[in-house]
Image (spheres, rainbow, N blue to C red):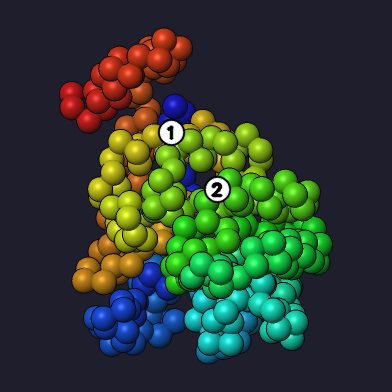
């Protein structure tokens, strides 16, 4: 691994204060303003950019938000569409059967695309948390997928210079999400055949979908559709959004290995929910863990690893990698 490449780190501004859980919706601290959350990000110098959802712009004008970020020297890595916390879209956004509500969701995505010039960001994130179903026989699957394809095609065609990144997730808030794993996202991209459609890989979402995160990075990179990365950790059964590198060390190391090997040029954006840890401390640990693990790869014995892989020798491959942890 090259020691010259520098990882670009970002964080979701939603992680930096006021995170809630289902048992305590107001969160474990007093509400935190967008100004305070931005200041908190600046306390972690390794992080150079933020992501945000469009609903932030209901509290502050886009121009004022951009000025706040400029004052702190922060960039924007991605702007995301929030369909999941608006009651009108509880039964779907891009797939809603009401044409008026579906149109509102498509237009909301286009409005974000229009903002990318102001924020000097060429990536829009679509996590379609309400486009799915909860019960057998609730939906006609064919109609749902037709509507999804139609809506995504229109959004992608609105500005072919802006990347549209589909963030997949197995479930939550719906019991089943249509874009539930990497290969469903890839199916949509292949079917629509738009050059600006790609994928956001969330490490915890991949674990929850019973995927190997490193393999996902490898496959999506082969197809040149890895547009964005959300980084965290999880216990696999749920979207725990734990501190990156805190739980699954070997898989995290392999994930970073394939991030490097693939030539990915985008940001690693921390997407965590530090319910009972101060957000600044949690972000510091995310950055430290990520950068320290990435530095370990500089000592990985490449040729012996490749030879072990050629022989499918799991024990030898493990022996080579374990030396990075246990010298």
Residue 296 in picture, x, y percent from top left: 32, 32
Give the class, few, some or many, for how many residues have Cα within 10 Å of label 1's Cα (few <14, many ≥20). Answer: many
The N terminus lies in quadrant? top left
The C terminus lies in quadrant? top left
Q: Which residue occupies the extreme front position in the image?
A: 137
Q: Is residue 308 left or right of residue 274?
A: right
Can residue 185 be seen at all in this image of the molecule? yes
Which residue corresponds to the image point at 52% horizontal and 40% vertical from the top-left? 217
Which residue corresponds to the image point at 28% horizontal and 62% vertical from the top-left? 282
Residue under label 1: 257
Question: Label for residue 323?
Answer: none
Residue 125 in picture, x, y percent from top left: 60, 63
Q: CA distance from mark 2 to mark 1?
A: 19 Å
Task: Compare marks 2 and 1 and give the one earlier in the sequence.
Answer: 2
Residue 18 in picture, x, y percent from top left: 34, 80
- Along the line of sight, the residue nearer the viewer: 223 or 139: 139
Q: Is residue 9 left or right of residue 321?
A: right
Q: Nearer the viewer, mark 2 or mark 1?
A: 2
Which residue corresponds to the image point at 60% horizontal and 65% vertical from the top-left? 126
Residue 183 in picture, x, y percent from top left: 58, 46
- Along the line of sight, the residue nearer the viewer: 84 or 324: 84
Residue under label 2: 182
Which residue corresponds to the image point at 53% horizontal and 35% vertical from the top-left? 218
Q: Secondary structure at mark 1?
A: helix
Give the class, few, some or many, for how many residues have Cα within 10 Å of label 2's Cα (few <14, many ≥20). Answer: many
Q: Secondary structure at mark 2?
A: helix
């Amino acid at each position: 691994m090259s020691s010259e490449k520098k990882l670009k780190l970002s964080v979701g501004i939603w992680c930096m204060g006021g995170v809630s859980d289902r048992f305590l919706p107001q969160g474990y601290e007093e509400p935190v303003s967008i100004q305070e959350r931005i200041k908190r990000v600046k306390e972690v110098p390794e992080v150079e950019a933020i992501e945000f959802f469009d609903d932030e712009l209901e509290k502050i004008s886009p121009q004022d938000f951009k000025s706040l970020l400029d004052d702190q020297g922060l960039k924007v890595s991605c702007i995301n569409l929030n369909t999941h916390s608006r009651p009108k879209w509880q039964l779907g956004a891009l797939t809603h059967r009401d044409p008026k509500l579906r149109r509102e969701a498509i237009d909301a995505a286009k409005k974000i695309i229009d903002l990318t010039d102001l924020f000097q960001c060429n990536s829009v994130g679509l996590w379609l948390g309400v486009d799915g179903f909860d019960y057998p026989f609730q939906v006609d699957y064919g109609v749902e997928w037709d509507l999804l394809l139609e809506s995504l095609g229109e959004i992608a065609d609105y500005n072919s210079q802006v990347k549209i990144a589909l963030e997949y997730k197995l479930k939550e808030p719906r019991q089943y999400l249509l874009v539930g794993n990497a290969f469903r996202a890839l199916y949509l991209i292949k079917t629509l055949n738009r050059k600006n459609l790609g994928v956001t890989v969330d490490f915890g979402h991949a674990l929850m979908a019973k995927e190997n995160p490193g393999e996902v990075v490898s496959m999506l990179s082969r197809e040149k559709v890895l547009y964005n990365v959300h980084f965290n950790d999880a216990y696999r059964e749920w979207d725990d959004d734990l501190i990156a590198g805190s739980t699954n060390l070997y898989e995290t190391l392999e994930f970073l290995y394939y991030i490097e090997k693939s030539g990915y040029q985008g940001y690693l954006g921390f997407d965590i929910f530090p319910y009972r840890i101060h957000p600044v401390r949690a972000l510091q640990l995310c950055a430290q863990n990520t950068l320290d693990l990435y530095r370990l790869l500089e000592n990985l014995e490449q040729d012996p690893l490749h030879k072990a892989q050629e022989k499918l020798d799991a024990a030898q491959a493990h022996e080579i990698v374990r030396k990075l942890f246990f010298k």
